[in-house]
Image: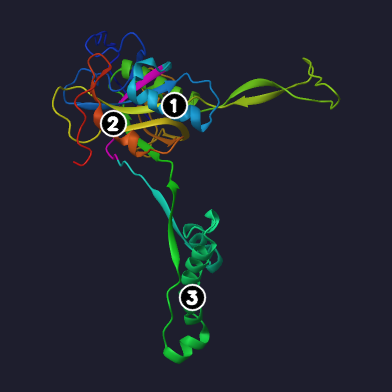
Amino acid sequence: MSTIEIMSAETTAVDTQHTLQPRPVLNSHFPSNLLTDTRHSSYLIFRCLAFDNPLINSNLRSLKRQTHSNPTTISTQFMIALPMPDSMIDKSNHDYGSSTSSIITEMGSAFIKGGGLNGNMGAGAQAATDVAIPRMIETFSQSNTMRQATGQTALSNHVSLFKGTQLREQTFRYQFQSRNLQELKSLSRIVHQFKRYSSATATTAKIQTTVEDKWKITDENKSTALKAPPLWAIEERIRSGLPRHFDRFTFYPAVITGIEVNMTPNQQHQSVAGTAGDPHSIELAITFKEMVPNLAEDIDAVAYYTQNARDGGFVKPTPLNTAR
C-alpha cells in the first residue's frame, strides 16, 4: 500500500455559464473542469428522477415522451455530469422468429378472405380448396417416400414474425484519478450516489392476517417491504454551438442493474495522503437497463431536438428529413 500527495487547496470557482436553473440542479460532476473546459464538447448527464408512479408500461411511456419534449418539467432528485466514456456503443436488438403455418389455419384464412363469413359460402369454400390442394401436395413432397424417390424435399411453409424490440442495456466504464481534494470529495459523492440510489429502500407494508368479511389490518399487522430504486435518465449534453449530425445519445427511463467499483485499478492500493485510506484512482462501471423499448418515434424525437447546454433547455429546429 502506498500514499499519494494531492493538492489540498479546493477550487472555489463557480461555473455560472453552465449551471442548470431553476430545476434540476446539477450537484455533482467530475472532473472539476468538465463544465468549463471547451475540450469537453459533449458530456453525459445522469439524472436521478423523482418518479413515484407504479412502474407500468403506460406510465413509463408517458415519462419517456415527456423527457423527449419538455425535460425541464421532469422532477429530478439530483444530477451527475461525467465525460463521455472511452468506449461508447449504442446497441439495439430486435427479435424475429418463424412459425410453420398449418393447412387448417390457411384454409380458414382463405375461407374468410373469400367471403365465407359474409354469406358467400361457395366463394369461401373455393378459396379454401385452392389453398388446401397445393399445401397437401407440399406435405406429401416432404414425406420420406418422396425424399427416397427424388432425393429432394420441399421447403416448409414458414411465416416470419416480428416479435418485438429488446430492452437496451448500457454499461458506462470510467477510469478516474483525483487531482485535488475537491475532486476526491466529488468522486466519492458520485460513487456513493450511484450505489445509494440503485438500491432498494426498506419501508413498511401492511398485510392481511385474517380472512373474514372485512380486512383486518392494524399497526400490529405490518411487515417490512422493499421500495424499488428510483428511475434514471441519461442523455448527452452538447456545449458548443457547432452543428451536430449524429443523434445525441439518450437512454431513459432506466434502472441501474449493476455497479462495480475497483479500488485497486493498478493492482495496488494507492491511498491519498492525509485521508483514512481513500483511493487515489478507481475504475467505475455502471450498468443501466431501459424500462421500455426504444421505438422509431423515440429515435425521431432525439433527431428533431438539439440542445442548448448553456441554459439546460431545448431548441426545436426544423424537423430533419427522416429519410436522411
* Quarter of the figure with the C terminus: top left
Q: Tell me the crowding category of disc 2: few under 14, some 14 to 19, or many 20 or more residues within 10 angstroms, Cα based.
A: some
C-alpha separation, residue under disc 1 versus residue under disc 3: 50 Å
Instruction: Select label 2 or label 1 by which is in front.
Output: 1
Q: Amino acid at mark 1?
A: Ser
Q: Position of residue 48 (x, y in %)?
A: 43, 22
Contact (Cβ within 8 Å) of mark 2 with mark 1: no
Q: Which three-letter amino acid code belongs to the residue tagged 2?
A: Val
Horizontally, residue 212 falls left or right of residue 101, namely: right
Residue named by callout 2: 302
Q: Secondary structure at mark 2?
A: helix
Left or right of 104? Residue 239 is left
Instruction: Write down the residue under mark 3.
Output: 133
Q: Which residues are magenta?
A: 78-88
Residue under pointer 1: 62
Query: Callout 3: 10 Å neighbours few (<14), some, many (20+)?
Result: few
Disc 3 element: helix
In the rendered structure, does residue 83 fall within the stretch colored magenta? yes
For the residue pair 85 and 11, the one nearer the viewer reads as 85
Asked if one can make out residue 101 in the rendered structure from this viewpoint, the answer is no
User: How far separated are the C-alphas under marks 2 and 1?
Assistant: 16 Å
| Contact flag, marks 1 and 3 (Cβ < 8 Å) | no
Q: Nearer the viewer, residue 124 or 107?
A: 124
